[in-house]
Amino acid sequence: MIKFTLRCEAEHEFEGWFRDNAAFEEQAGKGVLSCPVCGDGRVTKSIMAPAVRTSENAAAAQAEKNARMAAVMKQLRAAHEHVEKNFENVGERFAEEARAIHYGDKEQRDIFGQTTLQEAKELHDEGVSFGFLPPLPKADA
């Protein structure tokens, strides 16, 4: 596998993993690559510096990666705690409740719960404002 830094016409940079250079060229030629930020399908390889790793800097890179992941998990836990403490859990009635609040049939309040992807798409299409909070990974105590 090879990692390329890619760039769209709007100059958004992102990474892509490919079997080899030919796999990148094939996918780019078919137009199946797109920018995750803006959706632009005109994606090219960006200039990259080779990543040469020794066992010493590989360990340092892994430690840095672990520290970044720990920081992300801390923020995710804090977001979950805030929502659970300050929002009303409406469970599987989320789509129904969000729609009722949006149309003024129920009082404005902060809610959280679960919904299917289809219900989320319908809420989005109706202009109902909501967000997704990624689940926390299960802890193996």
Image (tube, rainbow, N blue to C red):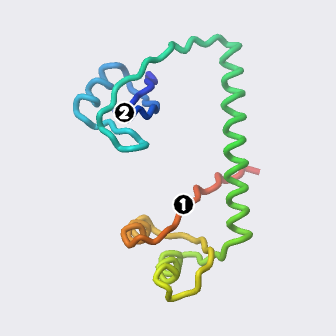
54 or 79: nearer the viewer? 79
- Tell me where residue 110 appears, x and y as whole percent: 62, 74
Three-letter code, disc 1: Phe
* Residue sticking out furthest to the right: 141
| 105 shown above or below 57 | below
Residue at numbered disc 2: 8
Seen at 46% across and 30% down, the residue is 15
**Rendering coords of residue 65 (x, y %):** 66, 31
Q: Which residue is at a point 42% across and 42% down the rendered structure image? A: 36
- Helix or strand or loop: what does disc 2 sit on? strand
Residue 3 lies, with reference to residue 35, above or below; the image says above
Mark 1 or mark 2, which is nearer to you? Answer: 2
Mark 2: give few (<14), some (14-19) or many (20+) Cα within 10 Å.
many
Amino acid on which the number 2 mark rests in the picture: Cys
Q: Which residue is mark 1?
A: 132
Residue at 33% x, 40% y is 40
Disc tally is: 2
From the top left corner, tell me how far across and down residue 77 is, in percent. 71, 54
Q: Secondary structure at mark 1?
A: loop
